[in-house]
Image (spheres, grey):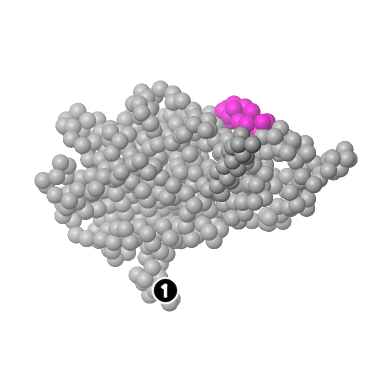
Amino acid sequence: MKMAMAVLLILFLALFFHSKADQAFDVRQHLSTVSRYGVVKDVADNSFVPTDIPDGCVPIHLNLVARHGTRSPTKKRMRELDRLADRIQVLLRDAQEHNLPLKKVPAWLLDWESPWKGKLKAGELISKGEDELYDLGIRIRERFPNLLNEEYHPEVYTIKATQVPRASASAVAFGMALFNDRGSLGPGHHRAFAVISESRASDTMLRFFDRCQNYKDFRKNQEPAVDKLKEPIFDDIASALQKHYDLNFTSQDISSLWFLCKQEASLLDTTDQACGLFSPSEVALLEWTDDLEFFILKGYGNALNYRMGVPLLEDVFQSMEQAIKAKEENQAPGSYEKASLRFAHAETVVPFSCLLGLFLEGSEFERIQKEEPLELPPKPPQKRNWRGSTVAPFAGNIMLVLYSCPSNSSSKYFVQVLHNEHPIRMPGCRGADICPFEVFKERIVAPHMEHDYNELCNVKLERPEQKPATSKLVLSLRDDATTSQRVEL
């Protein structure tokens, strides 16, 4: 009798803790790069204690590289969801023809249609995305009041976006918050501000991936191999769902249902339909397949993935050098740039984070400096740093804040990197989140400046006699690397 009671107690406790774990699991935090910013921005490494800004140091310049906010599915993806609706009806009819009961099938699946069926426009910034960038602008304005209190001028606060409407709309939402109550337009006292966009055909700063032919070739060649890596996960989950629901799901069905789950959870806050088909452990595996793909095709999986972002890194670095020059020369307020604000895509933010060496572990920073390949992100339940929901969710962002410090400080200028508004380790600065400018320049920037975008990407120049745009900066960095002394961290 006592043994039976003990067994029952163990079963009860197991069910109780399993139920509690499921309740604590928020699928919206596991949608890779389809995750909404507000859901994941504060999911951080709790073991990391940020460094205090040295006494007397003040911010003198801000660089921001942000992804656009939450958007609707693209036309290609909407067509996929329409095909999924047809496929589900085929599965249901097939089950009925084989006299299989449909009582296991969730009620929503019986007459499901895509929420985006018949929609003519696609890929645009939705209202949740507008809120993400507007709220980000409010928080940044509050965080750096002395840096962002200057009278607006497009050369003081430079705002750039790609020509893709969701990126430029994100820039507008951010700017409306940043300059709110700074003008005379309407009851909100808004003011007009400029958003600069380069042509898609020539934008090597924010859409460098578009013009990089070698990258396009690499991606096209690698995609089948990536699909092969993901296939066993989809096959296993398809088999599990076949048994659970008595429907003949294929691996392609699982891929489409997982996409539907991400769209429903992120855009509609619906987590009990497509997402409800998968257990938390299955969601973790599906999330891993997405993270694996964007590691290989957009991240550290190939040096070209991020080295083609050198024009962006160069622009960021030169803006900091100009800010230092303005400080040293005591230039008048309003005569130099105080913030450079850029709005683009995951394909921009991810390579930029790699150029900075973010999310690397152990000796991985030294390995990428030597162009040695990295291990793929470990499969769940093993832990990993490389998560799409962290690295580049909708509205994900990287800020580089340049600080000027008193003459008695260990360094006159420091760079702090904030990822999704939180200080983050820089392996190139020995794991610190605040880096002396000279160390940042020597250890993080200079090695990448050895590479020329046109050579990396096999870009045909209209005027081949013209020197590469990076040559002047490369020479400067090389000279400094040989003459400057190392700065203590």
Image quadrant where residue 87 sits: top right
Between 452 and 462, the one nearer to me in the picture: 452
**Label 1 belongs to which residue?**
188
Question: Which residue is rendered at x = 48% and y = 61% of the image?
Answer: 131
User: Dividing the image into 4 quarters, which one contains the C terminus?
Assistant: top left
Seen in the picture, residue 90 relative to 458 is either above or below; the reply is: below
> What is the x, y in percent for residue 187?
43, 77
Q: In the figure, is residue 433 to the left or right of 354?
A: left
- Residue at the outermost left position: 408
Q: In the figure, is residue 173 to the left or right of 428?
A: right
> What is the x, y in percent for residue 441?
26, 37
Question: Which residue is rendered at x = 71% and y = 37% of the image?
Answer: 241
User: Dividing the image into 4 quarters, which one contains the N terminus?
Assistant: top right
From which residue to which does the magenta span run? Answer: 220-236
Q: Is residue 322 something that shows in the picture?
A: no
Q: Amino acid at mark 1?
A: Gly
Seen in the picture, residue 336 relative to 412 is either above or below; the reply is: below
Between 442 and 332, the one nearer to me in the picture: 442
Q: Is residue 356 magenta?
A: no
Question: Which residue is rendered at x = 64% and y = 56% of the image?
Answer: 121
Question: Which residue is rendered at x = 39% and y = 33% of the image?
Answer: 360
Image quadrant where residue 6 sits: top right
Q: Is residue 226 magenta?
A: yes
Image quadrant where residue 46 sits: top left
